[in-house]
Image: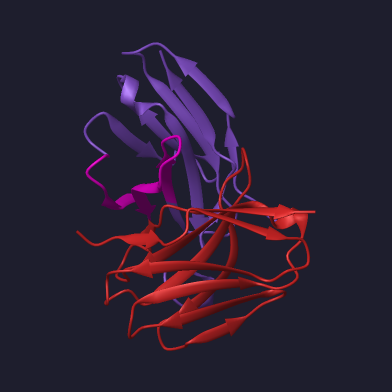
Chain colours: A purple, B red
């Protein structure tokens, strides 16, 4: 069964450093998302991406965050200068469509980011 | 603000029993609802969804019920198995152009053998 893959599974970084989290969405999907989950809390929406543009972003997704689809298969989340409060599990997701039967989001297994 | 919440943070059931996990949502404009299962160290896994024009949908061993009058969503798992032990999240989609999901806080389902 096709799946969303994320690398690395764990990332440890020093505060102020840049990190790039990588995702390979399901191949025929057109809509891509990043969510995050701070330990013990809800899964929170960060950003949605379609047609090489951000469709929507949350308040969390400030100027320190950016997303990119550098080629036909990868989708990345960059945090320019990490803060302690960025420590969380980051999930990539993709969907085939927006409405109808194919709007289901499929999630990857996540990247656990620890900022020291 | 708008939010999705769960009534029971932890539910413990015996293997073979039926489980019911509840969720309250507050945005009456939401038109699509999903239940996800999250096992330790993994991402949310789609279980079942339902649109606002339905009040019940069945899958394999799972049923989702939607009561729009009281803005309530439930997930029923028949003959609960140890492999069902996980955190279950409901999520709502406000609709529109982005498919953004708003997740609830999660319910931990613990299945006792």
Find the magenta span and give its range. A33-60
Question: Could you tell me residue A26's position as x and y percent?
Answer: 59, 53
> Which image quadrant is residue B37 in?
bottom right
> Which image quadrant is residue B62 in?
bottom right
- What residue is drawn where x is 53% and y is 59%? A29
Along the line of sight, which residue is nearer the eye, B102 or B108?
A: B108
- What residue is drawn where x is 32% and y is 35%? A66
Q: Is residue B79 above or below residue A5?
A: below
Instruction: Evaluate whether residue A82 shows in this view.
Output: no
- What residue is drawn where x is 80% and y is 54%? B113
Q: Quadrant of the N terminus of chain B?
A: bottom left
**Residue A46 is a magenta residue:** yes
Instruction: Evaluate whether residue B90 shows in this view.
Output: yes
Along the line of sight, which residue is nearer the eye, A84 or B99?
A: A84
- What residue is drawn where x is 32% and y is 71%? B95
Magenta-highlighted stretch: main secondary structure?
Answer: strand
**Residue A92 is a magenta residue:** no
Q: Is residue A74 left or right of residue A56?
A: right
Question: Could you tell me residue A9's position as x and y percent?
Answer: 59, 29
Q: Is residue B8 above or below residue B19?
A: above
């Amino acid at each position: 069964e096709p799946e969303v893959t994320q690398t690395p599974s764990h990332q440890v970084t020093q505060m102020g450093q840049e990190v790039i989290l990588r995702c390979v969405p399901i191949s025929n999907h057109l809509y891509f998302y990043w969510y995050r989950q701070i330990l013990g809390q809800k899964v929170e929406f960060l950003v949605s991406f379609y047609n090489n543009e951000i469709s929507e972003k949350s308040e969390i997704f400030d100027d320190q965050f950016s997303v990119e689809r550098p080629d036909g298969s990868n989708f990345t989340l960059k945090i320019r200068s990490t803060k302690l409060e960025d420590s969380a599990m980051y999930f990539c997701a993709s969907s085939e469509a927006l409405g109808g039967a194919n709007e289901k989001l499929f999630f990857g297994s996540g990247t656990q980011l620890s900022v020291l | 603000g708008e939010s999705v919440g769960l009534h029971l943070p932890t539910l413990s059931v015996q293997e073979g029993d039926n489980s019911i996990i509840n969720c309250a949502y507050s945005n009456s404009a939401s038109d699509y609802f999903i239940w996800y299962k999250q096992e330790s160290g993994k991402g949310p896994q789609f279980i079942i969804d339902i649109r606002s024009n339905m009040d019940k949908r069945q899958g394999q061993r799972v049923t989702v019920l939607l009561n729009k009058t009281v803005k309530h969503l439930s997930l029923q798992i028949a003959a609960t198995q140890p492999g069902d032990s996980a955190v279950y999240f409901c999520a709502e989609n406000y609709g529109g152009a982005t498919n953004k999901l708003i997740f609830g806080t999660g319910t931990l389902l613990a299945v006792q053998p």
